[in-house]
Image (tube, rainbow, N blue to C red):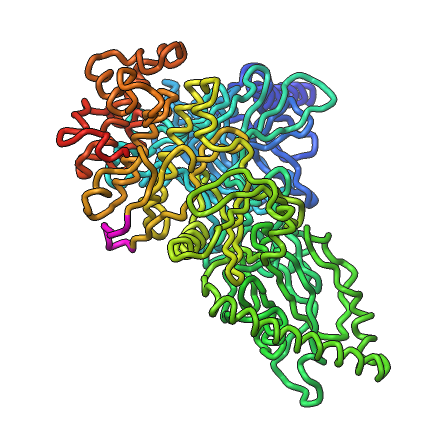
Amino acid sequence: MATAIFTLMFLVTMVLLQLMAVAQTNGSVPVGAFVTATDDAPSWLSSSGEFAFGFQPLEYKDHFLLSIWYAKIPEKTIVWYANGDNPAPRESKVELRGDSGLVLTDPQGNIIWSSGILLGTVSSGVMNDTGNFVLQNSSSDRLWESFSNPTDTLLPTQIMEIGGVVSSRRTETNFSLGRFQLRLPDNGNLVLNSMNSPTKFAYDDYYRSGTSDASNSTNSGYRLIFDESGYMYILRRNGQTEDLTKTAVPTTDFYHRATLNFDGVFTQYFYPKASSGNRSWSSVWSKPDNICVNMGAGLGSGACGYNSICNLKADKRPECICPQGFSLLDQNDKYGSCIPDFELSCRDDGLNSTEDQYDFVELINVDWPTSDYERYKPINEDECRKSCLDDCLCSVAIFRDGCWKKKLPLSNGRFDIGMNGKAFLKFPKGYVPLDRSPPQLPGEKKKPDIKFITGSVVLGTSVFVNFVLVGAFCLTSSFIYRKKTEKVQEGGSGLETNLRYFTYKELAEATNDFKDEVGRGGFGAVYKGTIQAGSTRVVAVKKLDKVVQDGEKEFKTEVQVIGQTHHKNLVRLLGFCDEGQNRLLVYEFLSNGTLANFLFGCSKPNWKQRTQIAFGIARGLLYLHEECGTQIIHCDIKPQNILLDNYYNARISDFGLAKLLVMDQSKTQTAIRGTKGYVAPEWFRNRPITVKVDVYSFGVMLIEIICCRRNVDLEIGEAENPVLTDWAYDCYMNGSLDVLIGDDMEAKNDISTLERLLKVGIWCIQEDPSLRPTMRKVTQMLEGVVEVPAAPNPFPYSTISEYSQ
């Protein structure tokens, strides 16, 4: 009898072991199979063995995570998990049940997590080679799948529909719900946002794909697709796509994943399958480009916790640093909030002045931009410091062409090389920081040791008196200098901007006394220079020759407008000088020069580059016209005002002629501006000027980009068609498009795109402004999202020569 019982138990055990191991050969998991959470527990493998489903041990003792991971790489990278908020204790069990799918229970039988099924009965599970775990019925219909219930990672062949959400984990090793989300809402814009806990209220987006169109829903995105080749893109309802993976990715023998990292950065990674000593996950791209700066919402702590400072690393991932005198609220969460190790009190001891009670730590290019409660301007640095010292609510003062006072808690802290300012962090004198200071920030100015500062209070009387005398002399000199400056400046510019302010002396030194001239326009020359902003940076300095009325207007317009704009197809303004009669603008330096030099040089740039440049310019103008805070008319779009970055991406420059329109204003009256050959006819007819003047100029330039020829070339004889737009329309009407591009075989082989771009250009140069499309419509037509109708004669009332002179 005992032998029979033993034999029966042995057979049952073997059956159970077979149930648990069956997936290791074919990926299929039968109903009744289970895995127990132990250190050496088996897992359910896909047929190739590349993915595994089972338990992974967590860093805290005797707890496990039910998950899917890459089984053939040493890191065992997790791509899906079930119970991040409720880790399973040792000896917990996951079982595949026919009536309720996957069920995770603790050792006492209490349910920790369940997949649940809406309809039908589960007949089996499958761990697929794509990384998708599927529950199916007897007809192989899918009842549940991990791909439809993503956590923080998407895999090739996975699709996210409207309403889909990917959520970050809390930290690298803590799989509970984190602070960041990737969402595809109803409007079709793929967005990244942070959220609060426990309500999961979504704060403002810090990244959006730009794939929504309120005026025409067919242009909006509705699916995020990660295809089997490793390319990720958004599919619009009209069938067009918006690529997120814009560069070539290795496809053969590589693993791919796209993960919303715990720090809020969404990154696509690849990993070599072949065994080698240097195997690791490498980044293809990340969104956003700079999370420290992009997260500027008024609510929430920012990329890091409260009172912390975000610093972007080379891999576009943030690191969070507690400033001196602060320490982590949770020592296990280095991306969390920081708390002061001292107390700032509004209780006056009645014995000492505020200067005797407090001092500052100085931080360069650090700001908490959403924590302001008071601002002063004009004010100098010493006055800014004193204002914060005298204010018991003030914890930090930012000096950057004005003084911004802030109180705790501080939010959205970041190190930003483009900020060009200083932060003064207040702490009590005599306070000695705990020996756990974070690494020094780039550009941080080291302060004397706090003990030394404390000791300096009791220095000898003669030293103190000398200090007072020197200070008095400096203050007197500063006062006299300010008075002189005020007379020269006649009150200064009064500009409200966050840009860096340069002195004339700084810019003269930066440009070696303006010796390296790289360009010249109607209002002055542009010089190449270098500035120190945490590191050496090459810049372009535009110097206005003299302060005449138009030059003054251009200067103020350019500073105010560019300082409020940010787009990948616009040149970035870094700072300005408004000292006495000197007016200078400091831009980022773009090494590939202007589109004019690129387009009209000896060798013709390739067709693909030209089309991408045209698309970029169109997107930049669309932003200026419809997407920035104040509608902007550029008024001087031409190849000389389009710069090219290192990758030949188009960047619109020279906003000196831009006209500002408030949102309820559609027209503006202005003097004639622009450049011969690009000026819309309404300029000459004393008609109101609208954004359609930019559309006209863009149309002319688009035809130039197609043909690699200037619109007006007086050196060409009349028989050779000196006005390009006239000739282009004739070629279009005669069906001889190949004549426009000469021997450009690449363009000839893409004749449909050539025709589409030419028709768009002709629509843009219509003499009647009402017939010209908006830049949004132009962008859609260029990218093939909407059809381009046959173009009418652009000059029914006059010839182009009337307004090209």
Residue 446's spot in the image, x, y percent? 75, 59
- Which region of the structure is painted magenta? 662-671
Given the current orientation, which residue lies at the most extreme bottom position?
Answer: 350
In reply to whether residue 663 is colored magenta, the answer given is: yes
User: Is 471 one of the magenta-colored residues?
Assistant: no
Residue 169: percent from left, percent from top: 55, 43
**Of 698 and 94, the residue lying toward us:** 698
Which residue is at 23% across, 25% downward?
Answer: 788
| Quarter of the view holding residue 323 | bottom right
Closest to the observer: 736 or 125?
Answer: 736
**Relative vertical location of residue 77 with respect to residue 674 in this rendering, above or below:** above
Q: Residue furthest left?
A: 797
Q: Residue at x 62, y 56 (%)?
A: 505
Q: Compared to 27, does 576 lie above or below?
A: below
Position of residue 45 relative to residue 209, above or below, is: above
- Report if residue 89 is visible in the image: no
Eyeballing the image, is 746 above or below 588? above
Relative placement, left or right, of 10 versus 722 is right
Looking at the rendered image, the quarter that the C terminus falls into is top left
Q: What's the magenta bit mostly, secondary-structure-wise?
A: loop
| Rendering quarter of residue 762 | top left
